[in-house]
Each structure stands twice: as structure tokens, then as C-alpha cells.
Amino acid sequence: MKRRIYFDHAATTPISPKVLEELGREAGLIGNPSSLHFFGRQVREQVESAREEIAAALGAKASEVIFTGSGTEANNTAIKGLFWKRAPRKVIVSTSIEHHAVLDPIHWLVQHEGALHRNLQVDRRGCPNFRQLKEIVDQEGDEIALISLIHTNNELGTVIDLERISSIIGGIPLHLDAVQSLGKVNFNFQASGAISAAISAHKVGGPLGVGALLLRHGIDVTPLLHGGGQERDIRSGTLNAPGILAFALAIKEMKENFNSQVEKVKGLRARMIAIINEKVPDASFNGTGDAPGILNVTFPGTDNEASLLLFDSAGIAASTGSACSQGVAETSHVLLGIGLSESEARSTLRFSLNHRNDMDEVEYFGEVLTNVIAKARAAFAAGSRS
């Protein structure tokens, strides 16, 4: 059987064995958490306990945890909800390297609700232009509905300087897409200075289909969903109790093992960088490396789709970091946003590691790297001549 190695943990992480066991056990629970009878109260008690555990682990109050179906839903709820709540303010500030779960709702608000999007520039590493941010705040502060920034970039691994951002924006609401932060870097909601943040279970060893919006106590936003009034009347709908309980266990595991897991991933990443530098010396790396599990590499003279398939043929799963629409691959807007050319962006791959990987897998990557890149360059050269 062909060896299979998973270096795409930024897309989704394997569910933890303990979490999977918990999910299976809790899936048999009887009772809607909103029901008043014994079964409903029993489930509600467990959900509230999970809420408290997640809040404590992330530096939030239990009342600030609003469960959603995904990180995307959490981002949409915060961005649209804050924009509508803060009318008639029209300005939304973000960078061009946000995840589509942030950029797309902003663009929708521009097209349908008259929002004005101010694009905050970033440098080659993916760090925001603080001077421009101050200029925007000075000029349009009273008209800014919200600022939305990705805390840990999903393609670059760059973590933004929240302390510096908070010192510039004052009381303007800041929303953070923190989906990639959990398990990779330290994230504390209270200390972040943000009014809201999006997180997701499946990025940290939890199940698919459950996320949360962290929203400051006492802050209301206009809801996307109306119905039963669950979750502070911000996210109506029957709660995914088994998923929520599994999410809490995944967060607990992450917190208990965070330091040792991060140190392991740092070692794996350092070895992978050394291998790439040795075997493909003209390769270059993008981002700051703040999140050790994300490694973004440009291999000159290749096409990343061909490289991806060649790595997959060798048993290694990676990512192009590009968005796909109806099966048509697009060049990564993140890489273009930090100043890479079209050809550079189209020759870049993302490898994302976590503590479930081991050094033997990294060494195997080194064994196949030279051959994969040689084949990718030959295919690229042949295509260029045709």
C-alpha cells in the first residue's frame, strides 16, 4: 500500500481519537437543549458546561461564547451583524489577504448594502500597514462600522500585532478571524482587544460542523438567523449538542498539550526548511513563521497544480492555497496581496503540519522532494514551449 502523509492540517485536522469517542457517545443523547423536560435540561447542562470550558480556555466569559455551525458562519454573523447594528456608518476596513469567509461577506455588503471597503495594505510578510491604518482611522474614524482582520493568516502563518492595532483604533469595533489561531499560537480573547472573534472546532482536532463566535458581553449584533432565539437571540437554531461537547474536549486537549505540541511542530518545520534549502536552494519562503505549522514555499519554474498532483502521487498531501470556484482554480489572492507576481504565486505550495506528524514523515518528504520538483519543472518548461 502506498504511503500517505497528511501535510494539510490548515485545511482541516484529523479528529482526536478521544474527541471521536466522545462524539460517538454524546450522539446518542436524547433531548433538545431548549426543551424544559428532564432530557432537555440534562443536555442543556452539558452544553453550558462545555461553553464554560471553552470560554475559560480562550480568555472569554461563558456569556461571550455563541455556538455556530462553522467559522464561516461566525465571521458572517459578526461582520454583517456589526455593520447593520452600527448603521448609518458605512466603512469597513480589512486587508486583501483575509480568508474568503471575511472578504466575501464584506464584498456582499458593498454590493447590496452600500458599504465602503477600505483596503488596508500589507507588507511582503503579510503584516498590516500601521501608518495607513492610522490615516484611515484619523480621516474616517466616525464613519467606520468595523475593522475585520485575520489573526493568524491561513496561508502565510503570519500573526498580526494586536497590541499595536488596538493602540491605533481606539474604540472602533475590531473583529478577528481567529480560526487558524487555535492550537498554533496563543490566543486570549480578553487580551486581544477585539469585540468579536471567529473560531472553529475542526481546526483543532474537533468535529466538522461546529464553530463559535466570541462576542463581548453586552454587545448586540443584528442576527442572520431568526427562529427560536437561541444563543443570545443572535444565532437561532437547535444547538449541535454532541458537536459542542466534542469541541470543548478538543479545546481542553489543545490547552493541556499546547507547549509540547508547538515545540514538536517547530522542530518538524525547521527540519523541513533545512531539507528544502538543501535540495531546492532557489526556493523561497513566504510569511513570518509565527504559526510554526504553516510553511508557504515558492518553487520557481513550477506550476503549483502540477506540483500538488506530483506530491499527491508520491503520497504527500499539501495545498496550493488557492480558492476554487466551480472547479476552476484561481491564483491565491493572499500571495498576490503580499506582492508576489502571478507566476510566483502560481508556483507556490502550502505545507501545514501539526503534532500528529512525525520526523519520519518529514524525512520521507525530503526523499521525494528533488524528484517531484524536477518533474514539475520539466512539465512547466514543456508547457511554456508549447
Image (cartoon, rainbow, N blue to C red):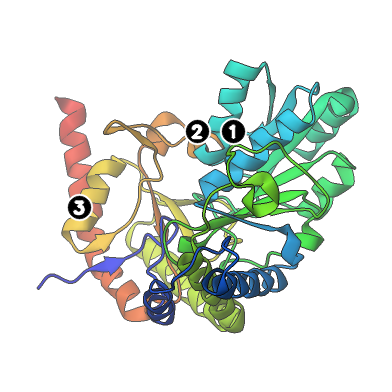
Residue lying furthest front? 37
Quadrant in which the C terminus appears: top left
Dot 2: within a 10 Å radius of its alpha carbon, few (fewer than 14), some, or many (20 or more) residues? some
Front one among 12 and 361: 12
Image quadrant assignment for residue 118? top right
Residue 310, label in figure: 3
Q: Position of residue 215 (x, y in %)?
A: 73, 52
| 28 displayed left or right of 42 | left
Dot 3: within a 10 Å radius of its alpha carbon, few (fewer than 14), some, or many (20 or more) residues? many
- Write down the residue under mark 2: 336
Q: How far apart, in angstroms, are the residues tagged by discs 1 and 2?
A: 9 Å
Residue 96, label in figure: 1
Front one among 60 and 384: 60
Q: What amino acid does circle 1 point to?
A: Ser
- The answer to whether mark 3 and mark 1 are in CB contact below 8 A is no
What residue appears at the point 62 percent right and 41 percent down from the top-left corner? Answer: 77
| 272 displayed left or right of 155 | left
